[in-house]
Image (tube, rainbow, N blue to C red):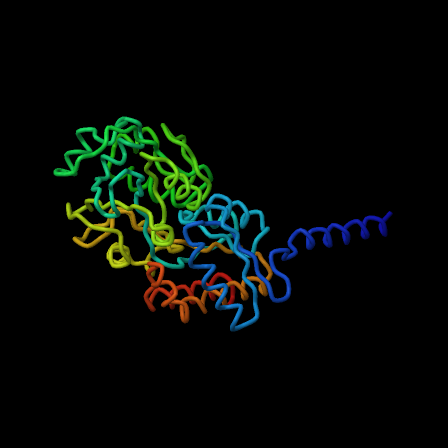
Amino acid sequence: MFKLMKLIAVLLVVAGAGAMAPSSWAGNSLTGAGSTWVYPLVSKWATAYAQQTGIQVNYQSIGSGGGIAQIKAGTVAFGASDMPLKPEELAAAHLIQFPTAIAGEDMVVNLPGVKPGELILSGPVIADIYLGKIKKWNAPAVQALNKGMTLPDMDITVVHRADGSGTTFTFANYLSKVSPEWAKKVGANTSLAWPVGVGGKGNEGVSAYVQRIRGSIGYVEYAYILENNLTYVRMFNRDGKLVSPSLNGFQAAAAHVDFTKAQDFYVILTDQPGPDTWPISGCTWQILRTDAPKATNEMVTKFFLWGFEHGQKMAESIAFGPLPPSTVKAIQAYWKKNLGI
């Protein structure tokens, strides 16, 4: 009986080790999943990294909600989310997170005769559109922001994300700050109970819907606007200044926060002050398991450190703002403290 019990104990240990096995990495490959926002950047870095090191980084653009779920389940080496997890949630799930790059998102529209940057919107008006209160493009509230422009008597088709999305969190977090009604009725999270609209999967899906549906409006990460030549809008920021989405505007927002002083780098960049600040600015975080094999976390951190040190021009080419050197040093200290790397 004692030998049988000992054998069962050994088998349980082996089974437990199998459950922790790093299926998300093998040899010279590494798998991550999550944010569609950061996909353009990670894919560029991964291509260059593979050429220089021979290590393949396979990234699945499935949305922040999926990335969080997969890293919690231990099925990927890293998860990516545009919504930071709170320190207590990280601790409970044996996770850590660190920022990757600064970026932003904007509203895109499909309106006959309207060129990129011509239409002007404000946060409260966008909230009322997404609440279903403003239904026509020539509604007085929209027309008041666009004096001298003849807007069509056309129904507004609202497009939002259908999947769990950090892009949605950033967008909804901003609307919650500028619209008390939005904050009360909808709030901010990766998935929402949308009052109106149709859902697209990923930034890619929202972009495709807006390109296809006349009279539509959607929110997407700025790199997708550049890559697809979408019709973006200008917005009024917290200081009341009319601004266009830009790398300068995203970095201006980030200048008002200090990642190095925030526990687990938990910061929010929406609706920051400053005349040049873009109001819907944000960041992407990479999430790792503290109980993953050390070799897995070493591969992940080496890849992102390479990106921080060698991938900044690639980041800037698609309007992702690089992290300042002080933040990169703080991230390295964070890895050493929590992962022993």
Residue 341 vs residue 116, the one in the foreground: 116
| Above or below, 2 relative to 47 | above
Instruction: Residue 316 in the image: state x and y as whole percent.
Output: 34, 63
On the rendered structure, is 134 left or right of 328?
A: left
Q: How many marks?
A: 0
Instruction: Residue 142 in the image: state x and y as whole percent.
Output: 20, 34
Residue 306 vs residue 329, the one in the foreground: 306
| Above or below, 290 relative to 127 | below
In the rendered image, the residue lying farthest to the front is 113
Instruction: Residue 55 in the image: state x and y as whole percent.
Output: 56, 67
Instruction: Residue 257 in the image: state x and y as whole percent.
Output: 27, 56
On the rendered structure, is 110 left or right of 69?
A: left
Query: What residue is rendered at 85% in x and 50% in y?
Result: 2
Query: What residue is rendered at 27% in x and 38% in y?
Result: 112
| Above or below, 17 relative to 111 | below
User: Which corner quadrant of the image does residue 111 belong to?
Assistant: top left
On the rendered structure, is 130 left or right of 42?
A: left
